[in-house]
Amino acid sequence: MAGIFKAYDVRGIYPSQLDEKTALAIGRAFHHVLDEDVLARTRKIVVGRDMRPHSEPLCAALIEGLRSSGLDVIDIGLATTPMNYFAVGHLDAAGGVQVTASHNPAQYNGLKFSRHGARPVSGDHGIPLIEQKVTSGELADGDRRGSFETADIFEAYGDHTLSYLTPAGEADRLRIVVDAANGMGSIYQPLLERMEFDLSPLYFELDGTFPNHEANPLKLENLNDLCNKVVAEGADLGICFDGDADRAAFVDEKGQPIGSDLITALIAGELLQRTPGRAVLFDLRSSRAVPEYIREKGGLPFRERVGHSFIKATLREKDGIFGGELAGHYYFRDNFFADGALLAVVEIINLLRNRGTKMSEIVAPLERYAKSPEINFVVEDKEGKIRELAEKYKDAEIDYLDGITVQYEDWWFNVRPSNTEPYLRLVLEASTQGELASKTQELQALLGEPV
């Protein structure tokens, strides 16, 4: 059980780190992180699971724990994580738990949590509190056994998501390759077919062993098959979901991956046309082109630290219309401020239909700078290394919103400690490719060999 309680969720190898006994205990502890005033009104908890073989027994144990603590369970069965968030809001539940290890390899499993209105479980009163209750054994049974019911929310989720779609005309019928990576995005096939484009499906067989490639679109090698198929078929767009389908990556008609920060900007532009003057959030690893474009489209850009709990909280606080992260998470005000990878697909399709031009041509005006991917370094003394960077670049504009961000007029970088792995992560951007190469070499000399 050691080490499975992460910053945003529970994640570990099954069954050596996360087993049914632990899932049951977590279910018994979950009520501690829910709002008392909400529990006085409803004790319903939405539970869903992904396609991994061990998700079913873990889910059964979790449900037993929730019910023994007095919570009422609504089981939505096989579902994507965004469907779970939607169900929490749509069914006015007190919270939700999704059994999934997202993009992790087959031997992993995990749990993702939310409170009422799909609010994240975060901070000291979140996952650390669940961990403390589980490890201490403070797991008293409820004064009554919770009820159990099943619900099918697929149709409601589909109707909600597709209500934002621009209808297709015969002249602008698109051909789109979608890679479900054998993950939960596979169940979206009926909804994708309702979007009125020619669907070319790739790896749509549910298989928790991930026989074709990792269900992690952030690694470019996992996009190779998608990129090749887009080019081979002369498609207009490629889309890849991760394992629990709460993230999506996009590829243009040339088979070139598009940075998720630029996708954030493009979706923001679409939404701001319909609702101008609203706040849009982006994570601090994003290109400078993102806030520039948001302003150009009449929006109010706000920079936020990495992590769904931070983005969602600030999005609610500012009543923002949309937010996006470099990892491919997209958050929509009209989706309970929660993840909506399929809604991001809808908005990119709207963009293509409304512009009537190639995806590469739509992205090109945003490719204003030379930018690195996220580069990982194993560093023992993370805080010491950040202090060292601050001293070396003390003539720059520096902030510590998340790790350290160092900004000069013609280049900038961010180095932040990973919340889930023993790494410092570097992202940098410069005015030219030459300067990017030079500064990357300079920073690698300080941080060590990339992993």
Image (cartoon, rainbow, N blue to C red):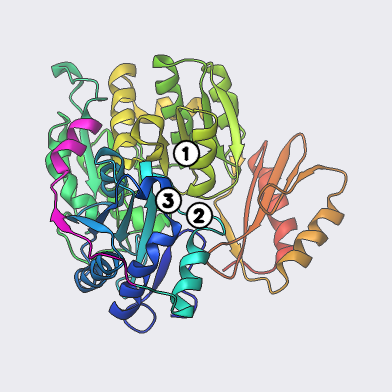
Q: Is the residue 93 above or below the residue 451 in the image?
A: above
The region drawn magenta spans 141-161
Residue at point 23%, 42% (across, down): 177
Left/right of residue 217 with respect to residue 169 in the rendered view = right
Residue at point 52%, 66% (across, down): 128
* Residue 446 belongs to the span the image colors magenta: no
* Residue 150 belongs to the span the image colors magenta: yes
Given the image, on which type of amino acid does mark 1 rest?
A: Gly
Can you identify the residue that label 1 sits on?
A: 324
Can you identify the residue that label 2 sits on?
A: 122
Within the image, what quadrant is residue 71 found in? bottom left
Which is nearer the eye, 240 or 60? 60
Given the image, on which type of amino acid does mark 3 rest?
A: Glu
Within the image, what quadrant is residue 97 found in? bottom left
Left/right of residue 449 with respect to residue 131 in the rendered view = right
Q: Marks 1 and 3, Cα distance to the nearest angstrom?
A: 31 Å
Q: Marks 2 and 3, Cα distance to the nearest angstrom?
A: 16 Å
Residue at point 59%, 45% (across, down): 285
Tell me where residue 51 appears, x and y as whole percent.
20, 63
Point out the frontmost of discs 2 and 3.
3
Label 1, secondary structure: give it. strand
Q: Marks 2 and 1, Cα distance to the nearest angstrom?
A: 18 Å
Disc nearer the start of the sequence (2/3): 3
Disc nearer the start of the sequence (1/3): 3
The residue carrying pointer 1 sits among few (fewer than 14), some (14 to 19) or many (20 or more) residues within 10 Å by Cα, namely many
Which of the numbered marks, if any, corresponds to residue 414?
none
Tell me where residue 158 appears, x and y as whole percent.
18, 36
Can you identify the residue that label 3 sits on?
A: 36
